[in-house]
Image: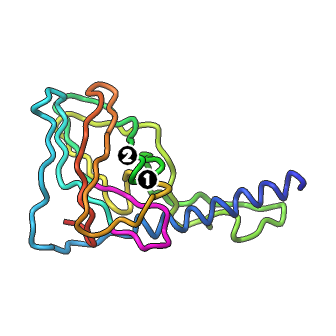
Amino acid sequence: MNKSNGKRHLLLGGTVVLLASLVACGGDDGDSNSGSNPEVASSEADGSGVEVTGAWARTSPSMVTAGAAYMTIEVTSDDQLIGATVDSAVAGMAQVHETVMAPAVTSGMGGSPMSAPMSGEMMMQEVDRIDLTAGVPLELAPGGFHIMLMDLVAPLEVGSTFEITLRFAVAGEVVVPVEVRSEAP
C-alpha cells in the first residue's frame, strides 16, 4: 500500500470512529427535567478541594463502542483536569475530550469527502488538560467538554452505575460515581 492510500485508510478509519463517538456523545438534551436531582459526588471530605455534581453517562446502543460521561466540576483552588481512567470492566480507556467545529479542509490531492470531517461539522478531539479556576464551575456536557469512554465492554444501560477516576494536576485522583441515564439530569 502506498503512503497516500495508507493515509486515506487511516483517515477513513478515524472518520468511522468519530461517527460512532458522535452518536455516543449526542447533542444537547436541552432543559429536559427528569424529575430527580443529580447526586453530589464530593471529594471535599478527602481534602482535595474538588466537588463533582451531576455525574452521568448517556445510555449507548448495542452496536456503539464508545460512550461519554458528563458532570460539573468545581475546585476551591486553581487546578487542571489532566486525565481520566475507567475500570477495564466498563471500557478499554477514558480520555478527556472536547467537541469543536472542524477546520476548513482543502484537498489538492483528490481526497475523498469521507476522509475527514467537513468544514462546519462538529468533531471531537482529545485535550491534554482543562484549566479550572477556583469557585468557577466547569460543566462537562454534550456538545462541549466530556469524558470519552472508548472500547466499551458492554452497552451502557439505564440505571447502571460505574466509577470514573479523574486526575488533577494539584488535587490528584478523585473517584466519581457515574449513573447511566437516557437524558441529562
In the rendered view, does 33 fall on the left or right side of 68?
left
- The answer to which of marks 1 and 2 sits earlier in the sequence is 2
The x and y percentages for residue 135 are 16, 38
Q: Name which residue lies at 31% across and 40% down.
A: 165
Q: Are marks 1 and 2 in contact (CB under 8 Å)?
A: yes
What residue span does the magenta drawing correspond to?
59-70
Neighbor class of circle 2 (other Cα within 10 Å; few <14, some 14-19, many 20+) is many
Q: Name which residue lies at 31% across and 58% down.
A: 141
The residue sitting at the right extreme is 2
103 part of magenta stretch: no
Looking at the rendered image, the quarter that the C terminus falls into is: bottom left
The residue that label 1 is drawn on is: 91
The x and y percentages for residue 173 are 29, 32
- Can you tell which quarter of the image residue 48 is in? top left
The residue that label 2 is drawn on is: 86
Q: Nearer the viewer, residue 107 or 126?
A: 126
Q: How is the image coloured?
A: rainbow
Q: Nearer the viewer, residue 90 or 176?
A: 90
61 part of magenta stretch: yes
Q: Which mark is on residue 158?
A: none
Badge 2 element: strand
Q: Is residue 123 above or below residue 97?
A: below
> Could you tell me the amino acid type at mark 1?
Ala
The x and y percentages for residue 125 are 51, 51
- Can you tell which quarter of the image residue 76 is in? top left
